[in-house]
Image (spheres, rainbow, N blue to C red):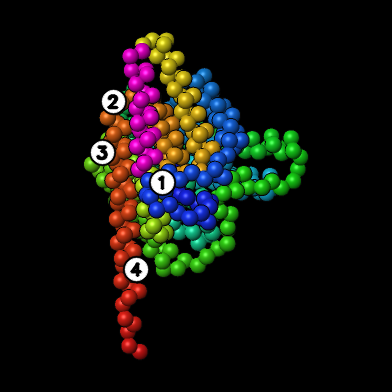
Amino acid sequence: MASASGRVGQPADKPAPTNWLSRIFRFDPAGLNWPRAVLFLDIALVPLVVFWAIGHEQYLLSALFGLFFAWLDDPGGSFANRASHIAVFTLIGAGLTALGFGIGGYAWGWLVLAAFVVTLVAGLAAAFGVRRFVNAMLLNLWFVITLGLASGLHHHARITSYTWAQVLAWVGGAALWLAATFTARLIRGRGDRPQPIPELPGDTARKPLTRPLVMFALMRALVTAGTVALAFGLELSHGYWMPIAAMVAMKPSLEQSTLTAAQRVAGAFIGAVTAALLLLIPASEHGLRLFSVERALEVVALVLFMHGVAIRFGNYALYCAAIAAGVLILVDLSQPTDHTAEGYRVLWTLCGVGAGLLVMVLADLLAKHTAKAPAPPA
């Protein structure tokens, strides 16, 4: 599962390699940040131990996404400013979590309508600055993930998932980051702090809702709704990976969309293979040994997330691989499936990026045709 901001924050002054494979896996050493990754692992161990203790690992992903996305939303500055921004972000995310898990088992038409509205509103958030647009895309991405998780849990009779508990897990994850910032304030003293992830854009200057901006937001909403309709209307196994991939692939420029799509597919494939190999370990285990292996794999998933945080701005494909492998492990441990599930996820990722790229190609051709059209006579 990749960030909606794509390659935002990666340096653009280096000459791009001519080989496509080298472009996909080009690594920027300046984007490597191990202290940030270790900090994430330290905080993420808290919800892991809590859900181990209460025996409800199906809520772990909501807590981890709440923690990570609240961290990404942190604007820096004074503690009051940071707390207010994160609180608003958390409340909006809690509402989307409740909506996603609440309607996840409903008829697919409601899911399509909700996905269209949420994606359209998120796209129009660009009028409030690039920073708000990135935050809205994160919430948009999380909403589609909740639809997929809720649908999967709905089809597993032995797993009980309550919407209010998923919302509480999301809020708890975000509250963990607030607690971490407050602890840092007590240690370092009062004063403004820089944005914790400076690679993300900080521009909050408002922009007019121009025709291209509205059309791009509408286009993203239609593609997301269409892929949600295919995924849930046809009841595709793990089909929610399709709208996620389509959303990530659609960038303002065709070249950026193509590169991001290729990195997304490569990362999904590497992550799926990694998860499938690791999930072979508990296949022949039983009893206490199976319990121990599953707990160990959950720790491995957190370590993969840690690596994803470390290399997020080093290489997007490797970031996707680490995040995808971690998510697949946690999902398959709580909702056991056969190993064809990883193949389906890669397939739907490929279909999703294909749909996003197709729309971007058509939009690019239409823009060029409009630019070449002769002006009407005065």
Q: Residues within 10 Å of mark 4 (few under 14, many from 20)?
A: few
* Residue lying at 29% horizontally and 61% vertically, measured from the top left: 362
> SS at mark 1?
helix
- Disc with the residue nearer the chain's start (1 vs 3): 1
Residue position for label 3 = 236
Q: Of the residues tagged 1 and 4, which is closer to the observer?
A: 1
- Bounds of the magenta segment: 265-285
Q: Residue furthest left?
A: 234
- Disc with the residue nearer the chain's start (3 vs 2): 3
Residue position for label 1 = 22
Q: CA distance from mark 1 to mark 4?
A: 30 Å
- Disc with the residue nearer the chain's start (2 vs 4): 2
127 lies above or below 151: below
Magenta part, dominant SS: helix
Circle on res. 338: 2
Q: Residues within 10 Å of mark 3 (few under 14, many from 20)?
A: some
* Residue lying at 29% horizontally and 31% vertically, measured from the top left: 341
Q: Do the residues under discs 1 and 4 have CB atoms within 8 angstroms?
A: no
Q: CA distance from mark 1 to mark 3?
A: 33 Å
